[in-house]
Image (cartoon, helix red, strand yellow):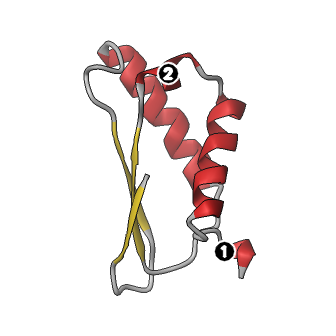
Amino acid sequence: MKAMPNGSNLSRYGFSVSKKVGKAVERNRLKRLLREIMRRQSLKPGWDIVFMARSVAVDADYHQLERAMIRLLARAQLLESEG
């Protein structure tokens, strides 16, 4: 995960999933899961965040991905509830 301040009142996020991760069906499924996880998070405003998926993420289930993403966001102090 990479994060940079964007000088705005809202936070944006995106996902980078390369072809090394798997075929198109697997990459799209992974992106759908990641989008759903982020939709449920309350982020601090003013950040651009990019998640870079690795090949092991394809084999992870929803809860494993959610724990990993929350851990990354908490470590970067980007969760709203941490204020």
Q: Is residue 33 left or right of residue 3?
A: right
Identify the element where label 1 is drawn: helix
For residue 81, what is the image quadrant?
Answer: bottom right
Q: Residue furthest front?
A: 75
Mark nearer the N terminus (2 vs 1): 2
Between residue 58 and residue 41, name the one nearer to us. Answer: 58
Residue 34 percent across, percent down from the top left: 52, 40
Identify the element where label 2 is drawn: helix
**What distance separates the C-alpha of mark 2 from that of mark 1?**
28 Å
The residue under label 2 is 56
Q: Label 2: few (<14), some or many (≥20) within 10 Å? A: few
**Mark 2 vs mark 1: in front:** 2
Residue 14 percent across, percent down from the top left: 37, 52
- Residue at position x 60%, y 22% from top? 60
Between residue 4 and residue 11, name the one nearer to us. Answer: 4
Q: Is residue 75 left or right of residue 13?
A: right
The residue under label 1 is 80
- Residue at position x 35%, y 21% from top? 21
* Image vertical order of residue 41 relative to residue 83, above or below: above
Residue 30 percent across, percent down from the top left: 47, 28
Q: Residue furthest left?
A: 19
- Identify the amino acid type marked 1: Glu
- Residue at position x 44%, y 86% from top? 9
Q: Label 1: few (<14), some or many (≥20) within 10 Å? A: few
* Image vertical order of residue 70 relative to residue 78, above or below: above
Q: Identify the image quadrant of the C terminus.
A: bottom right
- Residue at position x 64%, y 68% from top? 79
Residue 10 percent across, percent down from the top left: 45, 78
The answer to whether the residue labelled 2 contacts the one labelled 1, judged by CB atoms less than 8 Å apart, is no
- Identify the amino acid type marked 2: Val
> Which disc, if any, is residue 23?
none
